[in-house]
Amino acid sequence: MKLPFNLRAPSFDANAINETIRRALASAGLDTKSGPMHEVTETIRRALTSGDIASTKRVNVASDSVVDVVARVVDDPNLRDSEPARRPPEDRPQAHGTFDTHEFSNRAGTRAYKLYVPARVGVSPPLVLMLHGCTQSADDFASGTRMNQLAEEHGFLVVYPEQATSANPSKCWNWFKAPDQVRDSGEPSLIAGITRAVAERHGADPRRIFVAGLSAGAAMAVILGETHPELIAGVGAHSGLPYGCAHDVASALAAMKGGRSGLAGIGNPVGSVAARRGKVARAVPIIVFHGDRDHTVQHANGAEIVQQAANAHSAQAGGAVTRIRSESGTSPGGRRYSRAIHVDAKGQPLIEAWTVHGAGHAWSGGSASGTFTDGSGPDASAEMVRFFLALPRAGSA
C-alpha cells in the first residue's frame, strides 16, 4: 500500500494525520483500540512521530488474495495469575526427536511437509496433523504451539504440511475456494495424501489420526473432518471458520467478520460431501478454541463450528440431543475462559468449546518464539492433545 503522503517531509502535522487515519478506519467499522488494526495505527503513529518509517516495525497489510492478517495480542495488565490447573508448558520434555522435511505429490499438486518423530515412540503411535495459519511455516507453527514437546511426552507423530506461495501468496490454506472444500480434490486431497503416506510409512494407528489448525489452518482442519471422516478421528479448530461458509475471497472476508454469504446448507452441512456420493458421513469429535476479542476472525465463527458439530452428532444419533455441561476458570497466565462440553448418552465428550476471554487472534498458551501466540491463555495444545487421546478409537481407516 502506498501512503498518500511523504513520511520524511519535515512540515506535516503528525497528530492531524494520525487523527484523520483513525477517523477513516473508525468510519469503516474497524476497531483501532484493540486487535490487528490497533497495531497498524500504533505503527503509523510511531512512524509519523519519528519521521522515519524505516525504524518502525513492519506491518503486513492484507491484499485481495489474503484472508488473514498478522495480529499480535497485547496482554491485559488488569488480568492476574490464578492457581494453575494443568501442567505448565515450561515443565514439558524438550524435543529431541527428528524433525525432517519431505514432499508429497498427487494430481492436485505438490506440497512440502515436516515430520516430527519423538525420540521414544511406541508401536502404532497416534498421529497429529498440524495446519499453520497465513504467513506461517512448519517451523514457526511448531515453535509457537510447542506440539513437538507434547509429542515427546506422549509418544505421537506430528506432521506439518506447508502451504506453497504459488498456491496462495500469503501461504493461507485455500479454505474459501470451492475446489478445496470437497473430497478427492485440491488441498484436502493433498493433506489427506500426506497423512496416509506418513501413517503407512511409520505404522501410525489408523484409528488415532487427528488434525488441528489455526485460523486458515483451522478452517482447513474442519474441512478435513467433513471430507475425510473415515481418516480423521478428531479435529482441533483454533480461531477458525465453519465448513462451507465461503466460496471466494469476498465471501471469505464477510465470513471472517461474522457474515454468512457462503455455500447453501451452512447451518447443517452434516453429510453434505458424502451425501453427494450416496453415503452418510460420520460425525467427528471436535475441540474448538476462540478468543472473544478476535477481530480478524470473529468469535461467532467458532460458535458456528460448534453448532455444525452439534447438528452432525445429533443427526448421527437419530436426533438425540447431546447434554452440555459448562465450567469457567482462569489460566495460570491470567486469562479467564469458559468451556462447554457436549457429551453423548454414555457421557463421552463429543465437542469441547473453549472461549478465551479478552484474547485476540492467537494460539492460546503458545510460545512467544512463534507468531500468532498468546502465552497468557489456557494451553490449547495440551488441551487438544488431552481431548484427542481420550477419544475412543474410531472405526478403521
Image (tube, grey):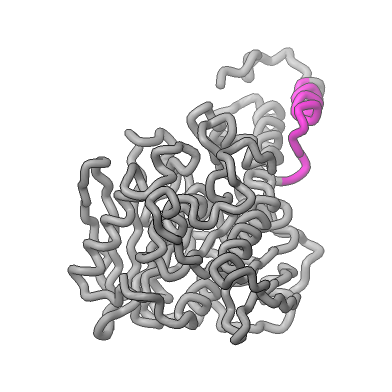
Residue at (65, 30) in percent of width and height: 47
Where does residue 340 sit, x and y in percent of width and height? 69, 72
Residue 178 visible: yes
Q: Is residue 366 above or below residue 329?
A: above
Q: Is residue 101 magenta?
A: no
Foreground residue among 197 and 118: 197
Foreground residue among 359 and 168: 168
Q: Quadrant of residue 252?
A: top right
Where does residue 361 sit, x and y in percent of width and height? 62, 51
Q: Is residue 274 above or below residue 26?
A: below
Residue 140 visible: no
Q: Is residue 91 above or below residue 295?
A: below
Where does residue 141 sit, x and y in percent of width and height? 43, 57
Magenta-highlighted residues? 17-34
Q: Is residue 58 above or below residue 199?
A: above
Quarter of the N terminus within the rendering: top right
Residue 197 as seen in the image, left or right of residue 183 = left
Quarter of the C terminus within the rendering: bottom left
